[in-house]
Image (cartoon, rainbow, N blue to C red):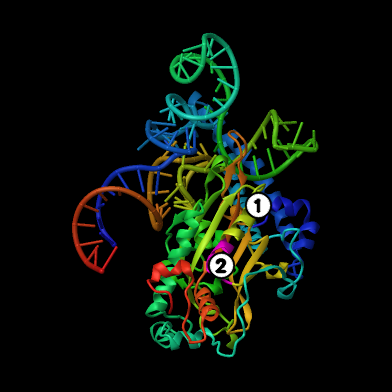
RNA sequence: GGAGGGGUAGUCAAGAGGUCCAAGACAACGGUUUGCUAAACCGUCGAGGGGUGCAUAGCUCCUCCGCGGGUUCGAAUCCCGCCCCCUCCGCCA
């Protein structure tokens, strides 16, 4: 959520920057609603001041045993008028809130304008695997080695609910365990959150109301299946005023993630590439506005360190404005190369949401004792998303004899060197 | 799911139609005193929003006592609905 006062003061400046993500952005209705709301607010407040005054006098007169019937009549009319105005004020506030909730964050100055093709590859790290003819894609490898069973996953839940079996199941769990411990060692506070979230929580995350189609909803209980731990962890300190000395707060959580992925199927995204359920170790930080871009660099470095520990080839991509999630001001993706698909796929998305989510969830901090509270900046980074990582490992680490050579760090966790 | 108890500011807590513009304590902050630390004493001390200001300064107004409605000239206080926490019972891995 953007700050209505910034919008009020510099509507054209904000609109220009928003148009780099969506050329359709038009703030006129929003600004009209804001005017209307402010006018109503002033009127209501003036009447309430009069009513408070009058009501107090009623009390005083009654105490003195005087008649107050003229005042009572006036106050009665006043209250009726206030009631009507308040109703209109409520409606205007609600409509303004709906408009505000739809607007995306303003991109950071370093974010290039444009869509997917305007993303900038900042760096490429590690050795790119070869394109030897014996290489297979992870679907083939998974079934050859008895690691994945998509047919039976579908039997249980439907298409695109992957199932890991045997050493495949152990590999998935080992990756989660390794990444979780890795980040705890690097100073993140471990969290094991609920895997479902309330409507309010997803609103703060900015998943709702605009992206309701992407999440699984359990209507009967008014709960949603977790789409990403970002949505959960941003609610960890909802409504709080944090102590400035405690910042930054850094958390690491493991969760399964559920996404409907409505209308996003493609033949090239079969197997583990795009699924309804995957596992993710998520990093999340609350910090000050001054620190947040340094903090983003650290999150990226921490996410990267997992890929380095696994010995993976990857690239670092700065997303362009139209490719940003609604809440993000700046996002850097880490993409691993999948030889079987011949292209790179995102395994981590590292974003600074600045005060966008903090404003939605009223998450603030006090810079120094006695100072006014200010909104924190929230950041998130996958550290990393598996399913895709498993696909990448299988395709990158396959050997000519068909076996998969495990990275050193995973071997103690599976008890074998090769799958 | 059932019964009972509870939710008031950073924490604890009083308050039961007008004196609440929310007591008091603790914590915190500033100061006085003081070999040092501590104690004592004095003072400051919730949040959001509107108006007026160059102002994140003053002044002023409105709102907030778990959330949402209602009654009333007037609600922390009365009524209705909901949420959360605690204790017990039931069901359950």
Whether residue A245 sits left or right of residue B66 in the image: it is: right
Question: Does the magenta portion include A4?
Answer: no
Please report, as a chain letter, where disc 2 is located: A
Q: Report whether mark 1 lies on the same chain as mark 2.
A: yes
Residue A23 in the image: above or below residue B13: below
Q: Quadrant of residue B14?
A: top left
Residue B42 in the image: above or below residue A81: above
Q: Quadrant of residue A412?
A: bottom left
- Looking at the rendered image, the quarter that the C terminus of chain A falls into is bottom left
Magenta stretch, overall SS: helix
Residue A63 in the image: above or below residue A274: above
Residue at disc 1, secondary structure: helix
Outermost residue toward the bottom? A133
Please report, as a chain letter, where disc 1 is located: A
Is residue A223 at all visible to an observer of this figure?
no
Residue A307 shows which numbered tag?
A: 2
Is residue A301 at all visible to an observer of this figure?
yes
Counting from the top left corner in percent of width and height, residue A375 is at 62, 48
Residue at disc 2, secondary structure: helix
Residue A294 shows which numbered tag?
A: 1
CB within 8 Å, label 1 to label 2:
no
What residue is rendered at 70% in x and 58% in y? A33
Counting from the top left corner in percent of width and height, residue A409 is at 47, 66
Counting from the top left corner in percent of width and height, residue A18 is at 74, 63
What residue is rendered at 72% in x and 58% in y? A108
Q: Earlier in the sequence, mark 1 or mark 2?
A: 1
């Amino acid at each position: 959520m953007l700050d209505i006062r910034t919008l009020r003061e510099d509507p054209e400046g904000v609109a220009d920057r928003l148009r780099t993500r969506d050329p359709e952005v038009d703030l006129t209705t929003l600004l009209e609603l804001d005017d209307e709301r402010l006018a109503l607010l002033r009127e209501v407040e003036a009447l309430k001041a009069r009513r408070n005054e009058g009501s107090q006098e009623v009390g005083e007169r009654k105490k003195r045993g005087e008649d107050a019937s003229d005042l009572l009549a006036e106050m009665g009319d006043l209250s009726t008028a206030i009631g009507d105005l308040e109703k209109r004020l409520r409606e205007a506030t609600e409509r303004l809130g709906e408009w505000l909730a739809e607007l995306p964050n303003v991109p950071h100055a370093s974010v290039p304008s444009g869509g997917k093709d305007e993303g900038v590859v900042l760096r490429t790290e590690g050795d790119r695997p070869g394109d030897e003819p014996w290489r297979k894609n992870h679907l083939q490898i998974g079934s050859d080695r008895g690691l994945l069973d998509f047919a039976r996953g579908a039997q249980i839940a439907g298409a695109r609910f992957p199932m890991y079996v045997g050493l495949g199941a152990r590999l998935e769990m080992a990756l989660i365990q390794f990444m979780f411990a890795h980040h705890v060692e690097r100073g993140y506070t471990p969290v094991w959150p609920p895997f479902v979230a309330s409507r309010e929580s997803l609103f703060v995350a900015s998943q709702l109301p605009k992206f309701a189609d992407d999440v699984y909803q359990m209507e009967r209980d008014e709960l949603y299946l977790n789409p990403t731990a970002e949505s959960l962890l941003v609610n960890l300190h909802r409504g709080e005023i944090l102590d400035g000395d405690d910042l930054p707060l850094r958390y690491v959580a493991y969760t399964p993630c559920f996404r409907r992925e409505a209308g996003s199927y493609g033949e090239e995204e079969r197997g583990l590439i795009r699924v309804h359920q995957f596992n993710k170790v998520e990093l999340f930080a609350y910090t000050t506005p001054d620190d947040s871009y340094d903090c983003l660099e650290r999150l990226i470095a921490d996410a990267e360190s997992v890929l380095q520990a696994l010995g993976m080839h990857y690239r670092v991509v700065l997303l362009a404005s139209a490719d940003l999630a609604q809440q993000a001001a700046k996002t850097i993706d880490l993409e691993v190369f999948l030889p079987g698909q011949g292209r790179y796929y995102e395994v981590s998305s590292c974003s600074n949401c600045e005060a966008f989510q903090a404003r939605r969830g009223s998450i603030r901090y006090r810079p120094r004792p006695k100072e006014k509270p200010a909104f924190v900046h929230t950041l998130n980074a996958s550290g990393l998303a598996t399913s895709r990582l498993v696909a990448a490992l299988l395709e990158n680490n396959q050997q000519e004899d068909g076996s998969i050579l495990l990275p050193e760090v995973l071997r103690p966790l599976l008890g074998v060197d090769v799958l």
